[in-house]
Amino acid sequence: MSELRTARLLLRAWRETDLGPWAAMNADPEVRAHFPDVLTPERSAASVARFQADIADRGWGWWALEVRATGEFIGFTGLDPVDEDMPFTGVEAGWRLARSAWGQGYATEAGEAALAFGFTALGLPEILAVTTTTNLRSQAVMRRLGMTRDPADDFDNPDAPGGPLRRNVLYRISAEAWRAVERG
């Protein structure tokens, strides 16, 4: 299992003690504002079981995110193959943080670690990121990571209900573009 460290964060395997704060985070309507609904504790626990299995099987996935200085669990960040029902293929980077962790640069810092892992350890040619058209905070993280968007790639998410959650944007960064940013 790969564990990633940044100056302030640890991206690690999930622990039993993460279940409570993860469930609380997923029950927060503001954290879930760009998703169809909040999650029950059971659905949150099921997602952790999937995350743990993916990390055990392939050594990477959606890692639990911890503040190194305090040991506080603040959400998740990582990489995952794009769902089969999407109109594109590849590996997606993503993040979800508790509200208490917003506005501190954690998503960008953790996202940078995930991209570095994807391009160096996995040798991926490209990494994608997806969110709703209304999730401007997440789109800002994508841009800070050097990802770019072509509006022609925007799409209707087949898993989302109608309304503002249906239309999604697709950001991407190639290994070549990432290396140019890293060297710059």
Image (tube, grey):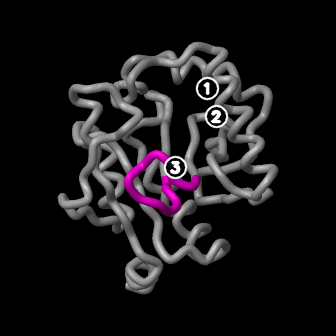
The residue lying toward the viewer, choosing from 93 and 91, is: 91
Residue, x 35% and y 56% (percent of image)? 142
- Asked if the residues shown at circle 3 and circle 2 are in contact, with their CB atoms under 8 angstroms apart, the answer is no
- The residue labelled by disc 1 is 22
Identified by mark 2, the residue type is: Phe
| Callout 1 secondary element | helix
The residue positioned farthest toward the left in the image shown: 151
The residue lying toward the viewer, choosing from 164 and 119, is: 164
Measured as percent of width and height from the top left, residue 55 is found at: 74, 50
Alpha-carbon span between mark 3 and mark 2: 30 Å
Looking at the rendered image, the quarter that the C terminus falls into is bottom left
Sort mark 3 into few (<14), some (14-19) or many (20+) by Cα contacts within 10 Å. Answer: few
Which image quarter: residue 181?
Answer: bottom left
Labels 3 and 2: the sequence-earlier one: 2
Looking at the rendering, the stretch of residues picked out in magenta corresponds to 80-93
- Asked if the residues shown at circle 1 and circle 2 are in contact, with their CB atoms under 8 angstroms apart, the answer is yes
Looking at the rendered image, the quarter that the N terminus falls into is bottom right
Q: Which mark is residue 84?
A: 3
Residue 48 is left or right of residue 118, and the answer is: right
Which secondary structure class fits the magenta region best? loop
Labels 1 and 3: the sequence-earlier one: 1
Measured as percent of width and height from the top left, residue 13 is found at: 75, 45
- The residue labelled by disc 2 is 73
Q: Which mark is residue 95?
A: none
| Callout 3 secondary element | loop
Labels 1 and 2: the sequence-earlier one: 1
Residue, x 70% and y 29% (percent of image)? 18
Residue, x 26% and y 59% (percent of image)? 153
- Camera-near label (1 vs 2) is 1
Residue 137 is left or right of residue 119, and the answer is: left
Identified by mark 1, the residue type is: Trp
